[in-house]
């Protein structure tokens, strides 16, 4: 019979599979740091969604996690939990970080892992890439602890760079599960696993477009995209608009008898959606869920909600009057640099269709520096961002000048003289700074320093004539937390060239940590938001090692540490002949950002430690501790 055929491309789909999900980091270990969210939180959110989907897959009988809350779980405990319970597959969930400018997806298995580990990686990685369509950084191998010591096929996914802050802020997306952000990655892990095991993956639903705000008694639309799995078809999609305060359902719509496949559904076209006027602003959120035919919330397959990002319903006392509102525009820009201006507008039915004219005007002369017309907009609410296509740049006058933005809503082909309404930033103009060649250059700064010992950073700078006088701000920042450790401002720079020596004494710590230096050239009394130029050593941080005065007499005893390379290229670290009075011995290995990449504890009552790790090329540091007492430290340069 067909149901009992076994495909040679997949493990047998008749097995009862058990899956261990490993949300990386947790507790005192935040992992990568984003502006609004930490990696440990994002990992747990994604794992919870992955478990939600995997629990609905026929053939998976148990999905468990190494942690269910924000708690410390050691690498050893994660591996022991998976091995003791004899899970069939192990998936470790992580997010990456670099310097805020990189975004992409990576998936790893153990370098010397089983064929099934490679197969699980190769089926999961394309789904993680498709989840967000970020850069594909490749399916790779590594010697991570949880991959090396788990006894079942295992992978580790780096879904995204949570510190990315380019076109958008990635950690903000996690914090609010923006457009079902965490859910999307959780479903990708489930889909990749199901493809690997020959199982049918479950349905999902997410919002692709919905308004930030609407006017009461005015029509608006909400768009969903969703997938209905074959084994859950035919299904119904239920869409609801709910009051954020009371939870009352203000609008509901059911799309029935949906067959398997991918779908997009726009609500608010027929029938139309409009919300009542309460005489004041209030908030609503949208929720969509897929259910069996005729089903409801209690037997849903999947759901998505905007409860964390509610929509404001504005009172509309004059619903037949058009309006324009600037949502965002820059206060200060550099000449010859791209800028963006965003506005929202409402076109009343009695004034539709209409044209929108956008202009940038020189505030002193009134000359129009940029002009764009959008024609024949229908009635309703619109959001328009100018500066995307085409891009907007303003010419350099080698001195500051002011501009303002003017938007005009007119009849088709109309102009200022027969306008319906307009909006202007004339009273709050934007300053255009000369894009002159001031610069800051670090001449020397240390790679490694010792806590409590003075060190020096040397830099030179050139201050352009158009930017004099200026202030120089020098900051020392913790690279993990972003906290400012030390600060100095040099005021009233009036010459062209300067050289500065900044001395600092780093604080002591029981851990290796990293700092970087940030220098900012600003107008007098200015700061980061009004900067002319800046330079940063973020990408080449300085490692701060604990002060030798905190190291026990161990350092002068006959105990020894040896570091060398094996013929196969592995970096090997031995500790032997340790005084037995030391207990709870542990070696922690750090990378150049101060992040722990591996650790090992004493393995027998002889207090002998042996570490063998296949580290990538680079510089690492290790600390040997006994009950948090630092016994020894050193630097490892891994070059093969």
Image (cartoon, rainbow, N blue to C red):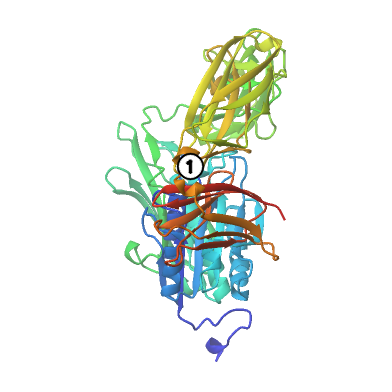
Q: Is residue 253 above or below residue 318?
A: below
Q: Is residue 544 above or below residue 432?
A: below
The residue lying furthest to the left in this view is 246
Residue at 57% over, 14% down? 490
- Pointer 1 residue: 172
Where disc 1 sits, the SS reads helix
Camera-nearest residue between 479 and 6: 479
Q: State left or right for residue 473 relative to residue 203.
A: right
Q: x and y percent of residue 627 in the render?
A: 39, 52
Q: In the figure, residue 498 lies in which quadrant?
A: top right
Q: x and y percent of residue 212 in the render?
A: 45, 38
Q: Is residue 352 above or below residue 239?
A: above
Q: x and y percent of residue 286 in the render?
A: 40, 49
Q: Is residue 54 among the parts visible in the rendering? A: no
The crowding category of the residue bearing disc 1, from other C-alpha atoms within 10 Å (few below 14, some 14 to 19, many at least 20), is some
Q: Is residue 142 among the parts visible in the rendering? A: yes
Total tally of numbered discs in the picture: 1
Q: Quadrant of the N terminus?
A: bottom right
Q: x and y percent of residue 192 in the render?
A: 56, 67
Camera-nearest residue between 271 and 501: 501
């Amino acid at each position: 019979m067909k149901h009992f055929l076994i495909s040679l491309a997949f493990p047998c789909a008749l097995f009862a599979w058990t899956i261990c999900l490993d949300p990386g980091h947790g507790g005192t270990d935040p992992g990568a740091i984003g502006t609004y969210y930490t990696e440990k939180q994002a990992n747990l959110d994604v794992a919870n969604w992955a478990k939600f989907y995997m629990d609905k897959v026929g053939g998976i009988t148990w999905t468990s996690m190494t942690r269910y809350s924000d708690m410390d779980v050691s690498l050893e405990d994660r591996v022991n939990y998976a091995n003791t319970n004899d899970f069939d597959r192990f998936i470790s969930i992580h997010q990456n970080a670099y310097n805020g400018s990189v975004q992409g997806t990576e998936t790893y298995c153990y370098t010397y892992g089983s064929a099934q580990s490679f197969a699980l990686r190769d089926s999961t990685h394309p789904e993680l890439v498709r989840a967000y369509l970020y850069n594909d950084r490749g399916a790779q191998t590594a010697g991570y602890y949880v991959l090396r010591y788990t006894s079942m096929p295992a992978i580790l996914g780096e879904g995204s760079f949570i510190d990315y802050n380019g076109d958008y802020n990635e950690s903000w997306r996690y914090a609010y599960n923006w457009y079902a952000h965490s859910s999307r990655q959780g479903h990708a892990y489930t889909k990749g696993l199901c493809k690997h095991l020959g199982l049918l993956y479950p349905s999902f639903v997410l919002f692709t477009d919905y308004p930030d705000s609407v006017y009461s008694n005015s029509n608006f639309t909400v768009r969903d995209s969703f997938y209905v799995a074959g084994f859950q078809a035919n299904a119904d999609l239920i869409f609801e608009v709910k009051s954020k305060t009371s939870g009352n359902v203000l609008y509901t719509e059911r799309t029935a008898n949906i067959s398997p496949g991918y779908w997009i559904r726009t609500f608010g076209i027929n029938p139309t959606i409009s919300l009542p006027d309460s005489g004041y602003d209030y908030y609503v959120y949208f929720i969509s869920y897929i259910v069996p035919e005729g089903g409801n919330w209690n037997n849903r397959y999947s759901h998505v909600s905007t409860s964390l990002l509610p929509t404001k319903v504005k009172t509309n006392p004059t619903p037949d009057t058009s309006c324009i509102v600037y949502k965002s525009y820059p206060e200060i820009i550099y000449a010859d640099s791209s800028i963006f201006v965003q506005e929202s507008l409402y076109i009343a039915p009695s004034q539709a269709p209409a044209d929108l004219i956008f202009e940038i005007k020189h505030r002193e002369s009134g000359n129009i520096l940029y002009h764009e017309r959008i024609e024949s907009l229908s009635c309703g609410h619109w959001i328009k961002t100018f500066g995307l296509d085409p891009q907007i740049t303003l010419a350099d006058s080698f001195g500051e000048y002011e501009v303002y933005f003017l938007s005009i809503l007119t009849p088709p082909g109309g102009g200022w003289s027969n306008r319906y309404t307009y909006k202007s930033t004339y009273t709050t103009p934007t300053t255009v700074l000369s894009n002159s060649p001031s610069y800051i250059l670090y001449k020397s700064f240390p790679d490694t320093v010792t806590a409590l010992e003075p060190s020096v950073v040397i830099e030179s700078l050139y201050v352009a004539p158009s930017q004099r006088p200026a202030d120089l701000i020098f900051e020392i920042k913790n690279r993990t937390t972003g906290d400012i450790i030390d600060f100095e401002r040099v005021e009233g720079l009036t010459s062209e060239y300067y050289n500065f020596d900044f001395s600092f004494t780093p604080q002591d710590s029981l851990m290796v940590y990293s700092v970087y230096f940030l220098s900012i050239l600003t107008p007098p009394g200015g700061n980061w938001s009004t900067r002319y130029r800046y330079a940063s050593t973020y990408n080449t941080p300085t490692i701060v090692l604990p002060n030798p005065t905190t190291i026990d007499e161990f350092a002068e005893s006959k105990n020894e540490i040896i570091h060398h390379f094996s013929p196969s290229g592995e970096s090997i670290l031995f500790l032997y002949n340790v005084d037995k009075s030391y207990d709870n011995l542990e070696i922690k290995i750090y990378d150049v950002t101060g992040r722990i990449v591996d650790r090992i504890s004493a393995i027998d009552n002889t207090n002998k430690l042996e570490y063998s790790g296949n580290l990538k090329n680079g510089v690492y540091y290790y600390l040997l501790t006994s009950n948090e007492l630092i016994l020894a430290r050193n630097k490892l340069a891994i070059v093969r």
